[in-house]
Image (spheres, grey):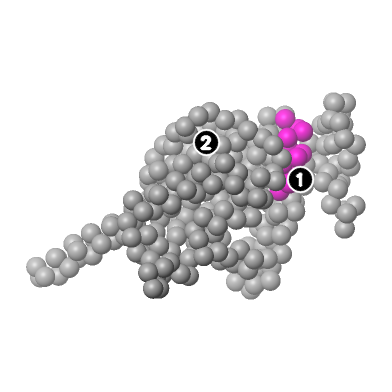
């Protein structure tokens, strides 16, 4: 009996040292204020192949946050200019199914201009002292869309979960695996939706139209695999909503008489996607 207890305790210690975090929605304090915020939460990991210790994972977490915040990713650097920052949320580990995001939590995030929360799990093996077969499960929560759903103003999937590598998204390094084109599609979507809510229609139209082709790329990738075909339909719903909001932004710009070139677009084709096919 004692040997079983000792084995159970030893297993628990190993699990903690491997970095299996308990779900916890602790607060995140960004280093500085910004018009828009992206909350990058501490990732979970379940094997020493991913990271030997939590300290090693936190060093990676520092590098990932800096990479995203400084727009080092070439595709992120190509997004329209907007004052957004990526906050490093150490110790903030939401449940993988997103059940922590109650109406009150989402409202608080929205009021703090958090456009998206990102969290998930990382895993890998080691071979010859090197990390191989890097994998990630990443959740993206679109805060302004979840708020709209909560208030009955929309009925569109706001939480999206993906497993990587997946098709065109493959990398040997965790930074490249997490900093992918899907992430940028959701960042652009969140900023565009929050700008729309704030009646900042030029920014809304720019970012929603930056998101639309990226979301379509995700949809096409998911559609090719039976296991993710249903997911492609939820992304299609999201993209349809994005285009609807972009069209509404164009209408507002035209009505204001101060929308510049964007005001000349058609609300039915607010991103000029039909005319360029």
Q: Which residue is mark 2?
A: 109
Residue shown at the point (36%, 64%) measured from the top left: 47
Q: Name the quarter where the C terminus is drawn.
A: bottom right
Extent of the magenta region: 200-211
Residue 209 tag number: 1
Secondary structure of the residue carrying numbered label 2: helix
Q: Residue at x 23, y 65 (%)?
A: 11
In the rendered view, would you say 71 is above or below 235?
A: above
Residue 217 at x, y percent in the picture: 71, 60
User: Does 265 sit above or below residue 223?
Assistant: above
Is residue 147 covered in magenta? no
Q: Residue at x 68, y 29 (%)?
A: 198
Which image quarter: residue 128?
A: bottom left
Q: Residues within 10 Å of mark 1 (few under 14, many from 20)?
A: many
Task: Give the percent coordinates (x, y) of residue 213.
Answer: 75, 53
Q: Nearer the viewer, residue 167 or 116?
A: 167
Q: Quadrant of the N terminus?
A: bottom left
Q: Which mark is residue 277?
A: none
Main SS of residues in magenta: helix
Residue 107 in view in this figure: no
Q: What percent of the width, then of the height, locates residue 252? A: 82, 31
> Residue 235: x and y, percent?
67, 57
SS for dot 1: helix
Q: Is residue 27 visible?
A: yes
Q: Nearer the viewer, mark 2 or mark 1?
A: 1
Q: Is residue 179 above or below residue 143?
A: below
Question: Do labels 2 and 1 touch, CB within 8 Å?
Answer: no
């Amino acid at each position: 009996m004692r040997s079983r207890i000792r084995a159970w305790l030893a297993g628990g210690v190993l699990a903690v040292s491997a970095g299996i975090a308990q779900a916890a929605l602790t607060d995140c304090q960004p280093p500085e204020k910004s018009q828009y915020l992206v909350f990058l939460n501490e990732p979970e990991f379940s094997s020493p192949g991913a990271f030997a210790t939590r300290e090693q994972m936190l060093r990676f977490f520092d590098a990932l946050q800096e990479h995203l915040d400084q727009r080092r990713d070439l595709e992120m650097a190509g997004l329209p200019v907007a004052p957004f920052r990526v906050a490093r949320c150490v110790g903030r580990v939401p449940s993988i199914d997103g059940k922590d995001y109650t109406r009150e939590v989402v409202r608080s995030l929205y009021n703090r201009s958090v456009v998206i929360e990102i969290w998930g799990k990382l895993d890998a093996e080691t071979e010859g002292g090197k990390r191989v077969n890097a994998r990630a499960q990443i959740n993206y929560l679109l805060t302004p869309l979840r708020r709209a759903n909560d208030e009955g103003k929309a009925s569109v999937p706001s939480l999206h979960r993906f497993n990587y590598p997946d098709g065109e998204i493959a990398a040997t390094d965790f930074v490249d695996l997490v900093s992918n084109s899907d992430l940028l599609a959701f960042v652009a979507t969140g900023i565009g939706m929050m700008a729309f809510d704030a009646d900042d229609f030029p920014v809304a139209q720019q970012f929603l139209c930056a998101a639309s082709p990226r979301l379509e790329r995700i949809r096409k990738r998911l559609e090719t695999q039976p296991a993710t075909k249903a997911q492609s339909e939820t992304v299609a719903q999201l993209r349809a909503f994005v285009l609807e909001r972009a069209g509404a932004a164009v209408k507002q710009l035209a009505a204001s008489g101060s929308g510049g070139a964007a005001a000349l677009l058609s609300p039915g084709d607010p991103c000029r996607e039909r005319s360029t096919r």
